Image (cartoon, rainbow, N blue to C red):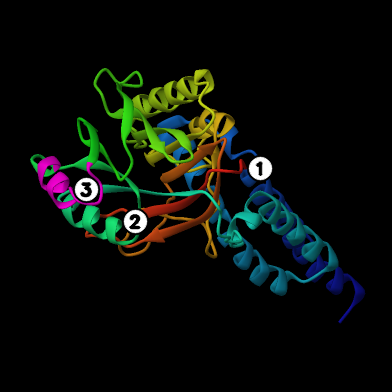
Amino acid sequence: MSHASHQRLSAPLIIARVFFVLLCLALAGLMVFHQQVPDILGLGLVVDNLAPWAGLGIPVLLVIALVVRGRASFIGLLVPVVVWSVLFGSSFIPHAKYAPQASLEVATQNVHESAGLQAARELAASGAQVITLQEIGQGQEEQISQELSQTHPYRYMVSTVGVWSAYPLKNAQPLDLGLGWNRALRVDVSTEHGDVRLYAVHAASARPTGHHERDAMLASLASYVQADDSAKIIAAGDFNATSTDRHFAPVLDALDEAAYSDWGLAMTWPRSPFPVLGIDHMMLRGVASSDLKRLPIGDSDHYALQATIDLDNAQ
């Protein structure tokens, strides 16, 4: 083969390697700047909430790197690997569990209308002392209250959001969070270690075709919490937003997310065929979580979350 022929064969390979490096940089840039993607036709919503899944592009790029070869290709591949590891890697590592001296077991689940009674029964059996349920079906409040009358005699419910507690509840207040009708609540749980302010939330739905009501509720919740002078705060429920959603950022500025105690992210929806989004959260201020687990409770399309809250330590 002549030298000229060798150069002609090398040119496409050089172009392929350059294009591959650009792909690597593009993937890394998408992960870093996903919240700057314009939310046109819901694109920003989709990219934000699927941001951790961008890591699935790395194995694909690895296969391509093995084909195009070259030192520059593998150096380029390191860029999205490092970016993904920095942004999301630590969240995939289990949070170390420990047994706090003063604790409170709190559970939350969107019961999808029909599964409220079963969820309440199973969460109570799992040891939850405070249970908050969202999307409770019509007529289920009395059924749940009767089921939990011996273990969780204190309750407060607003619309389709309710709290059942083994500890007395006080200072209960409905919250509309800018929605125009109540879809959240605020209540103090009186434990032997002091009061804990609980926000139970069911944010409005978020779809590519529209999520303004959800955005307004999240911003309003963040404002409530920032103005709240309570020493210990828990916000639990279905926020209809993952922690990478740009409109969830104000909530993350006001509260810390309880760390998951298992491998991977605490994806909670949908349960079938497999969870893709972590839209249910346990958010904290002035307390820490010593354990957070995901539970397949009832027949809802959401997993439940149950946290062991350390009342003596803040995150």
Q: Please tell me whether residue 247 is drawn above or below residue 284 in the rendered image.
A: above
Q: Which residues are magenta?
A: 141-153
Q: Residues within 10 Å of mark 2 (few under 14, many from 20)?
A: many
Q: Amino acid at mark 1?
A: Val
Q: Position of residue 23 (x, y in %)?
A: 67, 53
Secondary structure of the residue carrying tag 3 is: strand
Residue tagged 2: 303
Q: Nearer the viewer, residue 195 or 255?
A: 195
- What's the distance in space between the residues labelled 1 and 2, CA to CA? 29 Å
Horizontal side, residue 52 vs residue 188: left or right:
right
Residue tagged 3: 112
Q: Look at the image and tell me whether residue 57 can be seen.
A: no
Horizontal side, residue 142 vs residue 126: left or right:
left
Q: Residue at x 71, y 50 (%)?
A: 25
Q: Residue at x 53, y 47 (%)?
A: 258
Q: Indicate whether residue 203 is drawn in magenta.
A: no
- Image mark for residue 32: 1
